[in-house]
Amino acid sequence: MFTLENKTALITGAAGGIGAACALIFARHKIGGLTLTDVRKENLLHSASQIENETGVKSVCLDADLRKEEADTALIAEAVKRMGRLDIVVNCAGISRMGNIYSVNEEQWDLTFDINLKGLFFICRETFRVMEKQKDGCIINLSSQAARGGGILVTPDYPSSKAAVLTLTKSLAKAGAPNNIRVNTVSPGLITTEMTTTYGYDPKTVPLGRIGTGEDVAGAVLFLASDYASYITGACIDVNGGISMI
Ligand SMILES: NC(=O)c1ccc[n+]([C@@H]2O[C@H](COP(=O)([O-])OP(=O)(O)OC[C@H]3O[C@@H](n4cnc5c(N)ncnc54)[C@H](O)[C@@H]3O)[C@@H](O)[C@H]2O)c1
């Protein structure tokens, strides 16, 4: 089994289903340093303690609201201070809501874009400052099946923000390539997490016949974070059980 012993990682949204699964799979692969961040401090500490119980890997836990540029700058600086370097960043923090076009007001629109796109951008920009000096690193951004399909149960701000993540990732991949910074996207389909507990997904709509798990997504993230993906940048891996094959 390959290991991530010589690498360190920061995961946003690490109190959530997909973020926690990514943290666990990195820990199972003996990551050298792990920083977990989320706005929900209690849940973050719970994720970290489960990971430590199973793998022995201790995490640095930093609670922060990613909507503010200064918070993102401080977060990356603190992660580097605590771990020495930063090789992998996984941007899982995000929100979505059920509804239709009439259930979106200006406040919700701004909140969705502030978290799903603006916060993600500033995390990436601050990460670039570190990785450019290292001449190495990789970032994995979570988009969504909804980015290309428009979404089915969610309000339209969500797929719009996730489509922007796909495009932003390509811009960043071009900006990072000269310094060997790879930037890729993972686009999950229907995944059982807290975000989707009320959505009532029907497994019969999925060609592989089941709803996905955080572990399904984490496997793709692990691959992109590994040296096996060293020639992959600006790409998107769909993890959706075949629900869309565009
Ligand atoms: N679950 C799915 O079916 C699915 C499908 C496609 C894409 N995604 C994407 O995958 C990512 C992870 O989703 P998940 O299913 O684990 O959801 P989740 O709700 O379990 O986790 C999201 C995490 O983001 C955190 N967060 C929200 N606002 C924040 C803020 N301002 N600052 C810091 N952290 C904040 C939340 O506290 C939460 O822990 C999201 O970007 C989501 O859009 C999920």
Image: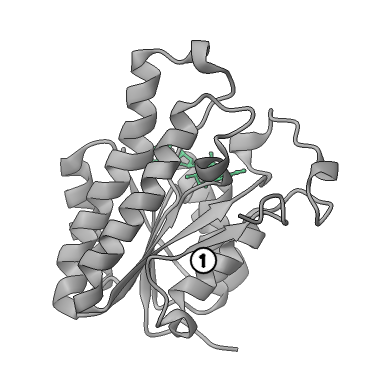
Residue most extreme to the front: 246
Left or right of 212? Residue 96 is: left
Count neighbours of disc 1 (C-alpha within 10 A) and say few if under 14, some if 14 to 19, many if 20 or more: many
Q: State the residue at coordinates (64%, 43%).
A: 193
Q: Image height check: is 160 above or below 226?
A: above
Left or right of 177? Residue 233 is: right
Q: State the residue at coordinates (44%, 65%).
A: 235
| Residue 96 percent location from the top left of the image | 51, 31
Please tell me whether mark 1 sits on a helix, a strand or a loop. Answer: helix
Left or right of 19? Residue 241 is: right
Left or right of 226? Residue 176 is: left
- Residue type highlighted by circle 1: Val
Residue that mark 1 sits on: 221
Quarter placement of the N terminus: bottom right
**In the rendered image, which quarter is residue 105 located in?**
top left
Using the image as rendered, state which of residue 94 and residue 74 is in the foreground: 94
**Can residue 26 be seen?**
no
